[in-house]
Structures are given as structure tokens and as C-alpha cells.
Image (tube, helix red, strand yellow):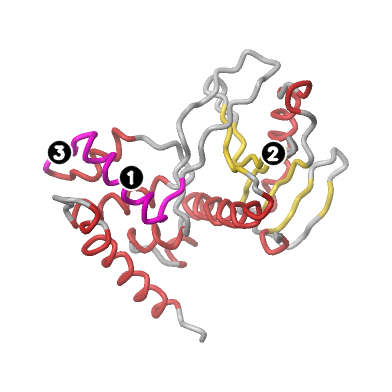
Amino acid sequence: MSLEEDDARDWLDAYVANIAEVDLPTLGPRRNPGNIRRLLAALGRATGTVLNRRALASDVGGAAGPIAAETLGNYLDALDRLMLVEPLPAWRPHMRSRSRLRAGSVVHFVDPSRGLAALGVGTQDLLHDLDAAGLQFESLVVRDLRTYAGPLRGRLSSWRDAQTGREVDAVIELPNGRWAAFEIKLGENAAGAAAESLLHFASNVDTQRHGDPSALVVVTGGRFAYRRTDGVCVVPITALGP
């Protein structure tokens, strides 16, 4: 059955309301539906960024002030138990350089539509804020990569050099020791800079310990798939598959 966007948004709004008013409160005592709604919205705004618990506590508490760290932890645990969020842990490989690597996880909903529903955001809003659209697109690609890597027993993580700010959006590790790195860009025009970032990252990984990457991939919202002369693959999201 095909639905118009308004119908889909009504369904998602009802789903988010059910999470806030029924699902999470039944998992433990004293779960405030208003706080849960604000948490879902805050996680929606923060998608694709490192989880900042202090900022989340302030956003959830609102005018009443930050909620307790323990309360926030309980809320996040409940969202994890309901399989609504699945943050990407940080990959901390052996590096040739003396990089100081980020240890925090990156925020992602299992389905990014949940965060957008909590924010009350639709397609027209995203078209007017392409930076926000890019982060939501990243979350969508991470969802697909996680789905396709699952049957291969692949593990997803992300990487960031805390000193330089350089980062890689997703790394897939397979049980046989093989690995691949992905940069995710909504626009095709950003593929060149993303490829350079992947090559810089791969050149600093200690391949004697980890092996060479099986693939370096830029996933875009564009139309064309091709391999660059430097070996980096540029792939539209529509070409991803098992």
C-alpha cells in the first residue's frame, strides 16, 4: 500500500507517542513521557554525532534543569532494549601516527525516521537544511550497512582522530579479519574530499596488524557508481545490497 507523506508522518507520530507514553514507562518506574519525547527529539538532532550525555541531560530536563545522569542512563538503556537506538562504537585500531582517538559512540537510531518524527520534521524541512539532511542521510546509510553486514557477521564502528577532527563514518570488520571503510555524503560533489579522507585514514592504519582494507567506499545520494583512479569506490545508496 502506498502512503502519502502526511499519512506516513501521522503513523510515525502515533508510534513515537506510543514509545513515550506506553513502551518506555512499562520498562521501569517514574518514566516521564515528556522527558522521553524530549530525549527522542534530542537524539534526532544529534544523529551522526558523538553522544554527549551532558547536553542530552540538559535537553531532556528542559526548563526544570538537567536530569540526573543515572536517569538519563536508564532512559538510554530502555531505548536500547526496545531496539530503537544502536549507536556506533568507536573503532580504535593500531595507527602508524600518534593519533589520540575518540572513545565515544556516534548516535544513530535503528530507523532514522523515528528521530525525524520526534522532531516533527518532514521532507520540505530537510530540503531547506541540507546539513541536517546530510546527517540523516548518514544515519540511513548506516542502517543499510548494518543490515547487509549482519548475515556476514560484520561489526560496524566509526573512527575519529580527536586531535585533527578527521573521521570515517563507518568501518565494517568481518570475522576473517577483513575490513572496509566508508564515508557517507549526500551530495555527489563531496565525493572527492571524502575519498581523500578515506585514503588519509587508510595510510595511517597499521596494516601489519590489521591488513589492507578490502574496500574504501564513498556512499552518496547521487546516481553514478564508479571506481576512481586512486582505487576508492563511489557508490549511490540505491546500489547497496547484500
Work out whether mark 3 precedes mark 2 in sequence or the reverse, and give the earlier one. 3
Marks 3/2: CA distance? 41 Å
**Which residue type carries mark 2?**
Ala
Looking at the image, residue 165 lies above or below residue 225: above
Looking at the rendered image, the disc whose residue lies closer to the viewer, 3 or 1, is: 1
Q: Residue at x 74, y 22 (%)?
A: 209
* N-term mark: 1 or 2: 1
Q: Name the foreground residue: 220 vs 39.
A: 39
Q: Bin the neighbour count of mark 1 within 10 Å (Cα to Cα): few under 14, some 14-19, many 20 and up.
A: some
Taking 186 as reference, is 18 above or below it?
below
Quarter of the rendering containing residue 193: top right
Q: Position of residue 9 (x, y in %)?
A: 38, 73
View extreme (top): residue: 98
> Separation of disc 1 and disc 2 at Cα?
36 Å
Task: Name the amino acid, label 3.
Answer: Gly
Q: Nearer the viewer, residue 218 or 158?
A: 158
Q: Which residue is mark 3?
A: 65
Q: Nearer the viewer, mark 1 or mark 2?
A: 1
* Residue 175 % position (x, y): 69, 40
What secondary structure is found at the residue carrying circle 3?
loop
Q: Quadrant of residue 238?
A: bottom right
Q: Residues under labels 3 and 1: Cα distance?
A: 21 Å
Q: Nearer the viewer, residue 149 or 122?
A: 149
The quadrant of the image that shows the C terminus is: bottom right
The residue where tag 2 is placed is 193
Provide the residue span drawn in magenta: 64-86
3 and 2 marks in contact (CB < 8 Å):
no
Q: Is 14 one of the magenta-colored residues?
A: no
Residue 79 in picture, x, y percent from top left: 34, 51
> Disc 1 marks which residue?
77
